[in-house]
Image (cartoon, rainbow, N blue to C red):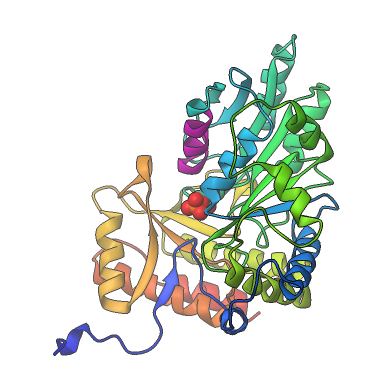
Amino acid sequence: MAKSNSFKAGRHFLQIPGPTNLPDRVLRAMDRAIIDHRGPEFAEISKRVLDRIKQVFKTNNPVVMFPGSGTGAWEAAIVNTLNPGDKVLMFETGQFSSLWSEIAVKFKLDVDLVPGDWRSGVDPKIVVQKLSDDKEKKIKAVFVVHNETSTGVASRIGEIRKAIDSVNHPALFMVDTISSLASIDFRHDEWKVDVTVGGSQKGLLLPPGLSFNAVSPKALEAHKNATMPKHYWDWKPMLENNKNGFFPFTPATTLVYGLDEAINMLLEEGLENVFARHQRHAHATRLAVKAWGLEILCKNENEYSNSLTAVMLPEGHDADNFRKVVLDEYDMSLGMGLNKVKGKVFRIGHLGDFNDLMLMGTLSGVEMGLNKAKIPFKSGGVMAAIEYLSK
Ligand SMILES: *Cc1c(COP(=O)(O)O)cnc(C)c1O
């Protein structure tokens, strides 16, 4: 028999910044029989999904969809557009941009990785400087992670686009939106992004297992001459098959049903309302953190993430121990500090299928945990959020 204290009544609070809580509507949409993925019924669903997903990326260009994690879509962006030895510009904004640059190195790209402090986003001024120094236009691509999930810092993609244009540089623009898509405003076409990388399990309201590349005409042009070996991630057979609602290999049928419903939900709420909701919850969270007297890892107010907040603990207090207390006592999972900020920060995910009371439960759990773990802090964070949300 299980020990009585191992039983957890009520709902677990999954407040990591992805995978996120699944809406019941999406769960129900996936609860159906598998159908023939080469038959007419599936073709109709996937054509509808591939068409409507474009609205989420704010694009009229094709979006390809792979069964796979976001990491796969990172690799796809590289192997479909570049050649071994190509020079590329990348920025160390945190763990996820560092991992993307490691993939680039493995594929023999010549990576200029601009170091960072893991508290700031990509500085458009450095983009201007790097690209204007590149007189021979050797840099083939600029890579940016829109929302750095390890630090809670959002880079300003529109301003980085302007920086690239200001020096008339022809480099491809590659953006990872895995934790910003359907949470923070992103505009694939308007910002002339060439490859946008997406994943299913963060703001897109789905389980892990699907990843995306939104592809510009310029990226398709580069694809024609890209010599990197590729098979699974090759856009060409994918785009050809997708025209008729099919895939070159077995798609993740169940996740495609889920995506159909997730898109319904996002469009019913309206994307701009989705962004405003995330902004409001992020603001309430930051008010709480400031009232607790704790420091937000993100340094610059104009780079605050609306998907998550990374919170620093005072010197001498271990964030992983704090997270363990919160999990054991209140059955809530908070995000851990990764790599350079391990043990120093915890992350509050406030993205996806989320509302005011879920946020208040989350912030209450954090405040109760701070008390329980004997972290020095000022009470009143929860009250500050309540006042803001009920104004
Ligand atoms: C989660 C995440 C990834 C990694 O996605 P996986 O699905 O774990 O491969 C990459 N980039 C960002 C910004 C993320 O948030």
Q: Relative to residue 388, is residue 15 drawn left or right?
A: left
How far across and down, in percent of the image, does residue 190 sit? Answer: 84, 46
Residue at (37, 68) in percent of width and height? 333
Q: Relative to residue 12, is residue 166 drawn left or right?
A: right
Q: Relative to residue 206, is residue 65 drawn left or right?
A: right
- The foreground one among 177 and 126 is 177
How far across and down, in percent of the image, does residue 192 sit? Answer: 81, 40
Can you see residue 367? Answer: no
Asked if 301 appears above or below 115 in the picture, the reply is below
Residue 101 covered by magenta stretch = yes
- The foreground one among 49 and 341 is 49
The magenta stretch is: 92-104
Asked if 137 appears above or below 208 in the picture, the reply is above
Quadrant housing residue 336: bottom left
Quadrant housing residue 54: bottom right
- The foreground one among 140 and 151 is 140
Report the quarter where the N terminus lies. bottom left
How far across and down, in percent of the image, does residue 321 sit? Answer: 24, 60
Residue at (30, 71) in percent of width and height? 327
Quadrant housing residue 271: bottom right
Residue 341 covered by magenta stretch = no
How far across and down, in percent of the image, does residue 103 sit? Answer: 50, 34
Can you see residue 236? Answer: yes
* Secondary structure character of the magenta stretch overall: helix
Residue at (75, 61) in percent of width and height? 56
